[in-house]
Amino acid sequence: MRNFHTKLKQKVYKRDAYTCQLRLVPGCLGDMKDRYEKWRAGKITRVKAGISVDHIHPTSRGGHWHLENLVTACIPCNKHKGSSVTHTVLL
């Protein structure tokens, strides 16, 4: 299952041009392509890169691991949003 999620996340990052689609907090990291490349090269951790995938409709509320239900999010925005609400993204 991990390999499936890893490949799906890579598709999401690429589709979203490695840019946070939430933009919820003043500290939003925005464009994370350089950080993503450093992470993939093993130069920094994923947390240091600050990149994550967020569910538009949270899995805790019945959302699924489908490309259409996922967006690239920086960790600060993803943590701010939490899993309590379905949200609109900037695609």
Image: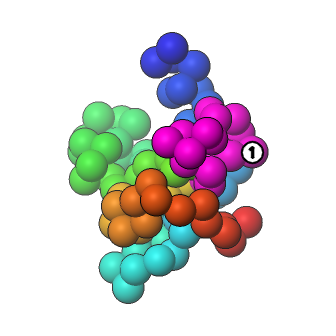
Judged left or right of residue 43, residue 66 is right
Relative height, residue 37 to residue 66 (above, below)? below
Relative height, residue 6 to residue 28 (above, below)? above
Relative height, residue 82 to residue 28 (above, below)? above
Q: Position of residue 84 (x, y in %)?
A: 46, 59
Q: Residues within 10 Å of mark 1 (few under 14, many from 20)?
A: few
Query: Residue 4 appears in which quarter of the rendering?
Result: top right
Look at the numbered disc 1 and give the secondary structure of its residue. helix
Q: How is the image coloured?
A: rainbow
Q: List the residue tagged with mark 1.
A: 68
Observer-nearest residue: 4 or 62? Answer: 62
Observer-nearest residue: 26 or 37? Answer: 26
| Magenta stretch in the rendered image | 56-71
Say which residue appears at 40% left-offset and 36% top-offset: 40
Observer-nearest residue: 35 or 7? Answer: 7
Relative height, residue 71 to residue 66 (above, below)? below
- Is residue 61 visible to the viewer in this orientation of the structure? yes
Say which residue appears at 75% left-offset and 45% top-offset: 68
Say which residue appears at 67% left-offset and 69% top-offset: 88
Three-letter amino acid code at the position of disc 1: Glu
Q: Position of residue 48 (x, y in %)?
A: 25, 53
Query: Residue 34 appears in which quarter of the rendering?
Result: bottom left
Q: Position of residue 55 (x, y in %)?
A: 57, 48
Q: Position of residue 79 (x, y in %)?
A: 34, 61
* Quadrant where the C terminus is found in the figure: bottom right
Query: Residue 8 appears in which quarter of the rendering?
Result: top right
Q: Is residue 66 magenta?
A: yes
- Is residue 11 visible to the viewer in this orientation of the structure? no
Say which residue appears at 40% left-offset and 80% top-offset: 25
Judged left or right of residue 36, residue 47 is left
Q: Is residue 1 magenta?
A: no
